[in-house]
Image (cartoon, coloured by chain):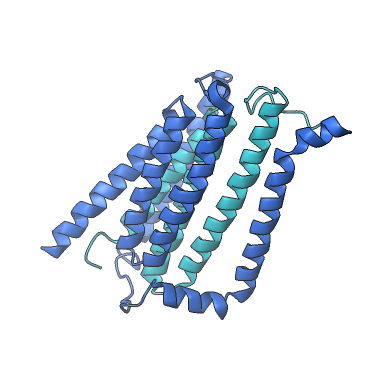
Chain colours: A blue, B cyan
């Protein structure tokens, strides 16, 4: 019975994920696109939970759906009508090439998955209860992946400074 | 695992990546391109987490967290660029922003 429930939750999350993804790409108002992306991130968090990644699911909702998307919505509100994104088409050749390239990617992945199906993909490892908990992730970050952890903090710092510099470029120009 | 095999998650991730790449290639608004990039990054994260579960190793989840941090940095820079473009009265169209001049 638990099995059926997990499948039902998976179908809802995967369906919501794909539907909101299509909405993000196809809507013409960036405000609604951003709202659809929040739905996308929330259903992805459900998939993460099903994959025993509790800490990542929480971080996804806090960092992405919380902080990043609020920043995004602020910028959309700041831009106002300028932000509208109608479907102005490029050359038809480019559009066709884009669709062909995207479907080629998809077909490649599905073919590779189909070849690997049944062997190792169907035999996931047994994991302990603490798998994906904040404690286990934090321990890895402070032992095996300490360098990556520190570099990530520097990347974030540089990005924050860069954002401020880009945002205030106009004032410096006027002063000069 | 009680639910679907890891392969099903990978297929969802592949379709998401395709949707995101279509958005990046077809849309002209830099805002929508940024959002589509987020979808592609998240598809990559989902793949990492699915394989982490399948291998029973947490390294994939740690890497997915690093991807999340890089995505946050990318959005901060991208939005800064878009605001700078808007302040200079440039059209918000990635096709027309093709010259690099100080």
Above/below status of A155 relative to A124: above
Above/below status of A9 relative to A38: below
Q: Position of residue B97 (x, y in %)?
A: 70, 27
Q: Position of residue A98 (x, y in %)?
A: 53, 31
Q: Camera-side residue: A100 or A13?
A: A13
Name the quadrant containing residue A93. Answer: top right
Query: Looking at the image, which residue is at 51% across and 62% down?
Result: B65
Residue furthest out toward the front: A175
Q: Image quadrant for the N terminus of chain A?
A: bottom left
Above/below status of B96 relative to A101: above
Q: Is residue B17 visible?
A: yes
Query: Looking at the image, which residue is at 32% across and 61% down?
Result: A49
Q: Image quadrant for the C terminus of chain A?
A: top right
- Left or right placement of residue A24 versus residue B4 in this view: right
Residue furthest out toward the left: A1
Query: Looking at the image, which residue is at 70% across and 55% down?
Result: A158
- Left or right placement of residue A113 versus residue B5 in this view: right
- Left or right placement of residue B10 versus residue B1 in this view: right
Q: Camera-side residue: B83 or B98?
A: B83
């Amino acid at each position: 019975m638990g099995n059926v429930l997990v499948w039902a939750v998976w179908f809802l999350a995967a369906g919501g994920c794909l539907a909101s993804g299509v909405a993000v790409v196809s809507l013409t108002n960036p405000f609604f696109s951003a709202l659809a992306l929040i739905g996308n991130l929330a259903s992805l968090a459900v998939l993460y939970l099903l994959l025993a990644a509790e800490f990542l699911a929480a971080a996804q909702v806090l960092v992405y759906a919380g902080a990043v998307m609020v920043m995004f919505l602020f910028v959309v509100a700041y831009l106002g009508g300028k932000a509208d994104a109608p479907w102005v088409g490029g050359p038809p050749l480019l559009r066709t090439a884009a669709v062909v390239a995207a479907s080629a990617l998809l077909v490649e992945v599905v073919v590779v998955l189909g070849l690997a199906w049944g062997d190792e993909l169907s035999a996931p490892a047994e994991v302990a209860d603490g798998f994906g908990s904040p404690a286990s992730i934090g321990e890895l970050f402070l032992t095996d992946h300490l360098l990556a952890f520190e570099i990530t903090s520097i990347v974030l710092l540089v990005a924050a400074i860069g954002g401020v510099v880009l945002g205030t470029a106009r004032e410096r120009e006027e002063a000069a | 695992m009680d639910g679907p095999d890891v392969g099903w998650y990978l297929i969802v991730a592949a379709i998401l990546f395709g949707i995101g790449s279509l958005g990046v290639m077809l849309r002209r608004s830099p805002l929508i391109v940024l959002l589509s990039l987020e979808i592609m990054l998240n598809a990559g994260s989902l793949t990492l987490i699915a394989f982490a579960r399948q291998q029973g190793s947490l390294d994939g989840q740690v890497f997915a967290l690093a991807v999340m941090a890089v995505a946050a940095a990318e959005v901060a820079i991208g939005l800064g660029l878009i605001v700078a473009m808007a302040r200079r009265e440039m059209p918000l169209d990635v096709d027309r922003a093709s010259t690099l001049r100080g």
